[in-house]
């Protein structure tokens, strides 16, 4: 008995989610376009993670932040060159990648699940993951490139397993390179995926072939920029690893392992929330036994689904192995996409193969689709309320920080352009968006100093140097000593800043806190070399 739902059985009862490829693309485009527009409407302030990239994307370099590959910054730098530094370029990259992730999620779902309705809700289901449906709008940068790379790589592997054509191996190599250029953690995803394919007899034949060498050759060649970036400062990468993966570890091996495993388990549940709850409510049959495949097409999908299931076991096992062998004891839910982003695909593949689905499955799909439709409304309402009501709906309410008004006061004080030395990335990133012809140097990212901007005659312009910081104490707005030292030692300024600091104060309407910014404008060519 064929327990999966065939496409032709759905033609008699049309409903909005009978989406073909073009229909899904339209729905996904509507979703990302709406939130792109909403972001531009709600605030002109740069978001929490974006400020770092705004500071970095001032010039081309092999390395920016030692903990991340440079490719995402290159994409943003290219958009800045085309559209100019601003929120439209930032949003175009963020939501363009989100759209790409949704489309490749759909491509994967259609290869695993014959029912177009179930495939459609499967592709949209990651939006019920908090760190995707909400976090993507708030702060993803490199992760927003990593997630579509994961879906694209799995889709490429499915193509290889199904057809074995040379162009599919070429596409697999490109997808692998995209992931490696997105985030270094993608290497774990790639290794686990290949190991999973090697464990299945049919898929093993597709992997142990000379054409797979083509995939690896293309991936290696296209991932060279990331490798080159690591070679620039290998000591920095080692330092980043120890600071992020081994922080706050207890003394003793057993204590370290216990903490690592506990954080891994907590991060797993946290990352998949609340999607796993809705899956159990609407599709509990995903936990039951699977029906045996009968047709050739069903057996093909069975192979792909088993590879996916083994991938999830292997990659989670590698994470556990990292705890025992490498001493990794620090996990965060937002670091889990390469490990868990494909988990919804596997669960819904099991749902499709559950015995006696029939009309009951269609009712569950409709209810789940309604839930999916409600989530964007809730996100819109909460995001708008954060911007308008503020506390207690947001903590620091950074999107309401009045940097536009602060920049106007600094410009009124006489700053025209040149170099900006900022105490932190929020000041630097937001002033970079207002003084687009100026170079911004950030104290926190002192390892990256962009070159001077070129003037009209192709000569460096540094007639002015703006030193700017948070003046926490309004009675003493003096610049921090480390900021002055950085100016003197790293930017070639030979004297002390003996000028009287200026102070600008603006209210964050959402949080009610006062944002006090101190600044000094230094005049003269070469002030901030």
Image (cartoon, helix red, strand yellow):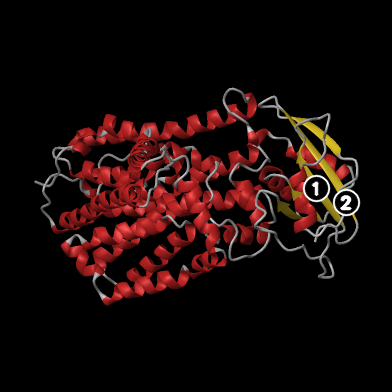
Residue 412 on image: x %, y %: 88, 42
Q: Where is residue 96 in the image (x, y as percent from the top left)?
A: 52, 52
The residue drawn where x is 40% and y is 45% is 336
The residue that disc 2 covers is 522
Q: What x and y, as percent, mark residue 183?
A: 47, 56
> Is residue 36 shown left or right of residue 259?
right
Give the vertical position of 351 relative to 141 (above or below). Answer: above
Name of the residue lying farthest toward the left: 1
Residue placed most toward the observer, 172 or 410: 410
Crowding at dot 2, Cα within 10 Å, few <14 / some 14-19 / many 20+, comes out as many
Residue occupying the far front of the picture = 252
Q: Residue at x 49, y 47 (%)?
A: 244
- Does 342 appear above or below 365? below
Considering depth in this image, is 24 or 350 the residue closer to the camera?
Answer: 350
> What is the number of the mark on residue 467?
1
Q: To which quarter of the image does residue 492 belong?
A: bottom right
**Along the viewing direction, whichever of 85 and 99 lies nearer the viewer:** 85
Say which element carries label 2.
strand
């Amino acid at each position: 008995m064929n327990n999966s739902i065939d496409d032709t059985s759905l033609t008699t009862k049309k409903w909005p989610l009978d989406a073909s490829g073009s229909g899904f693309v339209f729905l996904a485009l509507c979703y990302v376009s709406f939130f792109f527009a909403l972001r531009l409407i709600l605030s002109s302030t740069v978001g929490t993670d974006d400020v770092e990239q705004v500071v970095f994307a001032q010039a081309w370099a092999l390395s920016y932040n030692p903990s991340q590959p440079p490719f995402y910054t290159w994409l943003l730098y290219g958009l800045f060159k085309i559209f100019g530094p601003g929120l439209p370029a930032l949003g175009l990259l963020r939501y363009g990648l989100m759209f790409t992730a949704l489309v490749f999620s759909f491509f994967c779902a259609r290869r695993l699940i014959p029912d177009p309705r179930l495939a459609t809700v499967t592709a949209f289901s990651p939006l019920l993951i908090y760190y995707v449906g909400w976090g993507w709008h708030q702060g993803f940068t490199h992760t927003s490139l990593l997630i579509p790379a994961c879906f694209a790589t799995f889709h490429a592997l499915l193509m290889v397993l199904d057809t074995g054509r040379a162009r599919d191996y070429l596409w697999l190599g490109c997808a692998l390179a995209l992931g490696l250029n997105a985030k270094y953690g993608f290497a774990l995803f790639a290794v686990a995926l290949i190991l999973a394919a090697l464990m299945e007899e049919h898929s093993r034949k597709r992997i142990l072939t000379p054409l797979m060498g083509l995939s690896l050759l293309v991936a290696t060649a296209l991932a060279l920029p990331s490798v080159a970036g690591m070679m620039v400062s290998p000591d920095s990468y080692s330092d980043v690893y120890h600071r992020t993966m081994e922080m706050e570890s207890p003394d003793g091996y057993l204590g370290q392992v216990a903490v690592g495993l506990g954080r891994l388990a907590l991060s797993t549940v946290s990352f998949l929330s609340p999607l796993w709850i809705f899956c159990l409510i609407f599709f509990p049959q995903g936990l039951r036994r699977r029906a045996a495949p009968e047709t050739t097409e069903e057996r093909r999908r069975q192979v792909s689904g088993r590879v996916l299931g083994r991938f999830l076991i292997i990659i989670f096992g590698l994470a556990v192995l990292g705890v025992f062998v490498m001493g990794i004891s620090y996990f965060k839910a937002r670091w889990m996409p390469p490990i868990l982003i494909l988990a919804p695909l596997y669960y819904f593949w099991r749902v499709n193969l559950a015995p006696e689905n029939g009309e009951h499955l269609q009712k569950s799909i409709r209810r789940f689709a309604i839930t999916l439709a409600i989530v964007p409304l809730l996100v819109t309402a909460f995001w708008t309320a954060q911007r308008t009501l503020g506390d207690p709906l947001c903590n620091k309410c950074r999107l309401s920080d009045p940097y536009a008004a602060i920049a106007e006061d600094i410009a009124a004080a006489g700053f025209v352009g040149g170099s900006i030395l900022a105490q932190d990335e929020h000041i630097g990133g937001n002033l970079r968006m207002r003084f687009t012809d100026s170079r911004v140097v950030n104290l926190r990212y002192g390892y990256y100093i962009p070159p001077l901007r070129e003037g009209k005659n192709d000569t460096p312009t540094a007639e002015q140097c703006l030193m700017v910081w948070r003046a926490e104490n309004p009675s003493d707005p003096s610049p921090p000593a480390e900021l002055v030292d950085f100016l003197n030692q790293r930017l070639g300024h030979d004297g002390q800043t003996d000028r009287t600091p200026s102070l600008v104060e603006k209210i964050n309407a959402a949080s009610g806190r006062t944002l006090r910014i101190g600044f000094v404008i230094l005049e003269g060519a070469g002030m901030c070399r």
